[in-house]
Amino acid sequence: MMGLPAWAKGDDDMLHLTGLYSHPLTTEEQNQKLVALESMHDLRPFDLRDGSPPVEIPPLYDYFRRAGRPNEVFFVTTVDGAERIYEDFLAIYEENIRDSNC
């Protein structure tokens, strides 16, 4: 289960998605994903290099628990939808740049 991406509250036409696609993973692919996550040192609850003790991570933020899914989920859109997402992103980005320069 995963949530929808954020969009502007009250602006229904900004979510340009047409569906979800679920791509099943084999057990081997799931294991490879966990190995890739393990190689990302910043996701570990401790640093083996300095000998720091393990720290309890709340399950909500535990990537090792969340990433071991039997499938990958992708949002689906059309070419027109992708263009609108891009345009919306640029408009919001440019607005934030203008606001930060004031």
Image (tube, rainbow, N blue to C red):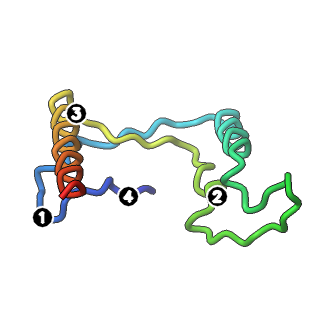
Secondary element at image label 4: loop
Q: Which residue is mark 3?
A: 82
Label located before the other in sequence (1 or 3): 1
Distance CA(mark 1)–CA(mark 2): 33 Å
Q: Residue at x 43, y 40 (%)?
A: 22
Q: Position of residue 25 (x, y in %)?
A: 58, 36
Q: Earlier in the sequence, mark 3 or mark 2?
A: 2
**Dot 2 corresponds to which residue?**
65
Res. 75 image quadrant:
top left
State if disc 1 and disc 4 touch (CB < 8 Å). no
- Disc 4: which residue: 3
Marks 1 and 3, how far apart at CA: 20 Å
Q: Secondary structure at mark 2?
A: helix
Mark 3–mark 4 Cα distance, whole angstroms, equals: 19 Å
x then y, percent, for residue 36 = 68, 38
Disc 3 and disc 2: Cα gap in Å? 31 Å
Please name which of the two marks, 1 or 2, marks the residue nearer to the observer: 1
Residue sitting at 18 percent across and 51 percent down?
98
Check disc 1 and report the residue beneath it.
10
In the visual, does 61 lie left or right of 73? right
